Amino acid sequence: MCTQGPGSLAADLARHLVDDGAFVLDVDPGEFGTAHLQVLVDVGWAARQASRMLDRSVRVSSTERGGRVVVTAEFGDVAG
């Protein structure tokens, strides 16, 4: 998922949160339908790192859309 290392994913996630208010990945579940599980782990870890970098709460959620999984990270302290 992350070809430049896990720190790069955390930095990208933090940048998207600051610039766009959210970090969104559209994930193909893969041949066995489980590829999104590693993405959830990776994004969850990166969200914790971004939370520390930005000193703000970050939450991660996922939804299924048309056989694909959409993983979203956003600030946890924003009313919604």
Image (cartoon, rainbow, N blue to C red):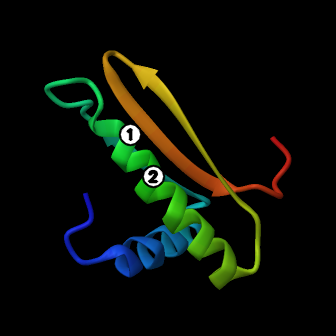
Residue type beneath disc 1: Leu
Circle 2 SS class: helix
If the image is split into quadrants, where does the C terminus sit?
Answer: top right
> Which residue lies at the image location 63% right of the left edge and 84% below the top edge?
53
Q: CA distance from mark 2 to mark 1?
A: 6 Å
> Which residue lies at the image location 50% right of the left edge and 75% below the top edge?
15
User: Label 1, on which residue?
Assistant: 37
The residue closer to the viewer here, 19 or 33, is 33
Q: Residue 6 in the image: x percent, y percent? A: 36, 74
Q: Is residue 20 left or right of residue 79?
A: left
- Quadrant in the picture for residue 61: top right
From what the image shows, is residue 66 above or below residue 74?
above
> Which residue lies at the image location 33% right of the left edge and 15% below the top edge?
66
If the image is split into quadrants, where does the N terminus sit?
Answer: bottom left
Circle 1 SS class: helix
Image mark for residue 68: none
Q: Is residue 62 left or right of residue 32?
A: right
Residue type beneath disc 2: Val
From what the image shows, is residue 34 above or below residue 2?
above
Q: Residue 10 in the image: x percent, y percent? A: 47, 73
Sort mark 1 into few (<14), some (14-19) or many (20+) by Cα contacts within 10 Å: few
> Which residue lies at the image location 61% right of the left edge and 60% below the top edge?
21
User: Label 2, on which residue?
Assistant: 41
**For the residues bearing labels 2 and 1, Cβ distance under 8 angstroms:** yes
- Quadrant in the picture for residue 56: bottom right
Sort mark 2 into few (<14), some (14-19) or many (20+) by Cα contacts within 10 Å: few
Q: How many marks?
A: 2
Q: Residue 69 in the image: x percent, y percent? A: 38, 30
